[in-house]
Amino acid sequence: MTSPDRAGIAPGIARWALAGLLAVAGASHLTWGRRGYRIVVPEWATRLTTLDKDAIVVASGAVELVLAGALVALPDERATIGRLVAAFFVAVFPGNLHQWQTGRSAPLMRTDRARFVRLLLQPVLIGWALWSTRGR
């Protein structure tokens, strides 16, 4: 009888936790936080995408839900999904930076300190996505 591969347990747990975080974030973009998130979408994002602020919030929530599902439903593609999650975190960083610079409040981001800490956590999220989905 062989023992379980302990080296794979921590990344697996971390991957499921990341999926949970993305699922909650995605759900909040589509429900209770939707209005609050529209407030912090920068004007340049609406010009760049030709979408209104609500559509950007809904789209980002949908992407978060799809990525969450992919993290758990596509184990054979986990490295690719991890890179996509990391790329998503990179893509939303300018909006987070804008939110901090303008001091606009959003759900769970009502203080300058919270908004600044969120910026510092972005590299952690990127690393988390890549580490938890690395190859077998």
Image: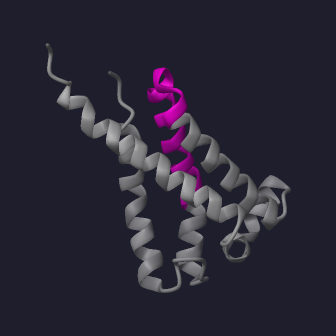
Q: In which quarter of the image is residue 47?
A: bottom right
The residue drawn where x is 36% and y is 54% is 124
Q: In this view, does 106 lie above or below 125?
A: below
> Which quadrant of the figure has residue 7?
top left
Q: Is the magenta stretch mostly helix, strand or loop?
A: helix
| In-image side of 115 versus 107 (left or right) | left
Q: Position of residue 119 (x, y in %)?
A: 44, 67
Front residue of 30 and 48: 30
Identify the residue at image location x=47%, y=84%: 112
Residue 75 part of the magenta segment = yes
Would you say 77 lies left or right of 10 here?
right
Q: In this view, which residue lies farthest toward the front? A: 1
- Position above or below: 46 against 62: below
Q: Quadrant of the C terminus?
A: top left
Q: Does the stretch in magenta take in 21?
A: no
Give the x, y percent position of residue 75. Answer: 46, 26
What stretch of residues is rendered in magenta? Answer: 72-93
Q: Which residue lies at the image location 40% right of the left edge and 41% below the top edge? A: 15
Q: Is residue 136 left or right of residue 96?
A: left
**Colouring method of the image:** one colour
Q: Which image quarter: residue 50? A: bottom right
Residue at 43% x, 58% y: name it: 122
Rendered position, 36 above or below 82: below
Question: Relative to residue 27, is residue 19 depicted above or below?
Answer: above
